[in-house]
Amino acid sequence: MLTLETRLKLVKKPKLKMKNVLKINHAIKPYKKNIEIEGDKSLSIRWALIASQASGKSIAYNLLKSEDVINTLNCLIRLGVKVKIFKNRCEIIGVGLNGYKYKKNLTLNCGNSGTLARLISGLLVHSKSKIKIIGDKSLSKRDFKRIIEPLEKFGAKFKGKFGKLPITIEGTNNAVPINYYEKKGSAQCKSSVMLAALNTKGRTFIKAKKSRNHTELLFQHLKLPIKIRTKKNHDMIEINGVKTVKSINYQIPADISSSSFFIVLTILSKESELVIKKVNINSSRMGILKILKLMNIKIIIKNRKNYKGEIIADLYIKSQKNILPINCPTKFNSESIDEFLLIFLVAAKAKGVSYFKNLSELNEKESPRLNWGSKILKKMGVKNVLKGSTLKIYGNPNLKISKKIVIKNFLNDHRVFMTSVIAALSFGGAWEIYDKNSINTSFPTFLKKLNQLGLKI
């Protein structure tokens, strides 16, 4: 069977002669622009997985066509799900709960996507035969014990070394509801258990540290039997098993994480203004905006509306002076976990010393991002001290770079690459940034969007 990528050519492979390095030799010139960002990656993957378990046809518009999402659709095709891509939409014909059909000894390649690997494992606790889950070099370094342990309680069996990919999962016909305490603030682990709980006879109880709530909102929109009690530091979630899941049509809003690269670029650039349309400002993803506000940065939110539980709005951003340092409240950590590398760049231009604490989860991502955040700042000439999970940054409001900087060997982490590009365009210098194809993981049009601001990359 041809993969979705081969049949539809959604992700173009680079020519062998193309250099996988980006050179930037000057800061960006002032601009005043309006842009739109592609669909939210977290929602794109969750929509596809839930749609595969629904009864009937689900349709998504503005689905992100990144490698993570393409890998999700490819995995569903291998599980016997019909997927159709058109110019402006994606259609999935759901097979119903526990309705996947596939050959024995199936292997699912999740590429770089931790969201896909962990969430689809939750759906496979009911698999009829063994399924092997693999990923790329970066994903294979990440911890999967955190989902293996709760999914084993449902009755699934796992094989693998040291709790890392590759792992083999063998499901059960009689999954039992469980009690689960998610302590790290991982929306992926929480969502994996939530998806597994749908196909049980009984009620699953989850105590979860605060994290993204996209899965909960989708469950509520579909009127699935879920109850949520919000506490100060955690949520109490109850989920009853069901027999069917309704199909879902969805207009995927713009991704706040992808938008953040352009938010920070505009803040740090001279005499620039930007409007980003129809961004998902879900309350569990607003950490970066809250942190920037504490740093004396004003971002105007307009045209706010509720769409199937998610809050959508337009963001108005201007260049900022007099950036204040911050002793960053740890309560914002889970809300901004994907944006901290960018926040560190803002702190680099603050007038004073900024402190960031309890960020060990950053080193559990595609690369040890906390370590890379410190490395990039040091290469820029920004004094910083990293001790354990705490980073201290000595800001310089007059920071300008005139030297050569090379960024490479970062495990193809898309956010390290894009953050380095934003640093180069904000502060100047002669940069060589390797592995530019890494953007295909989450934001394939990143460089094209930069060109819309007047660049020629």
Image (spheres, rainbow, N blue to C red):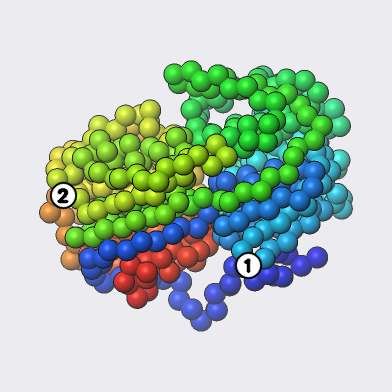
Residue designated by label 2: 321
Tell me the residue that label 1 is attached to: 87
- Tag 2 and tag 1, C-beta contact below 8 Å: no
Corner quadrant of residue 294 = top left
In the rendered structure, the answer to whether residue 115 lies left or right of residue 272 reads right
- Estimate the x, y position of residue 136 in percent, counting from the top left: 60, 55
Q: CA distance from mark 2 to mark 1?
A: 42 Å
Q: Secondary structure at mark 2?
A: loop
Tell me the crowding category of disc 1: few under 14, some 14 to 19, or many 20 or more residues within 10 angstroms, Cα based.
few
Question: Of residues 429 and 260, which is closer to you in this image?
Answer: 260
For residue 251, above or below residue 119? below
Report the number of discs: 2
User: x, y percentage for residue 388?
Assistant: 36, 34
Residue 207 drawn above or below residue 346: above
Please provide percent x and percent y for residue 221. Answer: 63, 35
Residue 125's place in the image compared with 280, above or below, is: above
Q: Going 26% across and 58% down the picture, which residue do you hit?
A: 273
**Of callouts 2 and 1, the N-terminal one:** 1
- Which residue corresponds to the image point at 24% horizontal and 53% vertical from the top-left? 318
Residue type beneath disc 1? Lys
Q: Is residue 177 above or below residue 142?
A: above
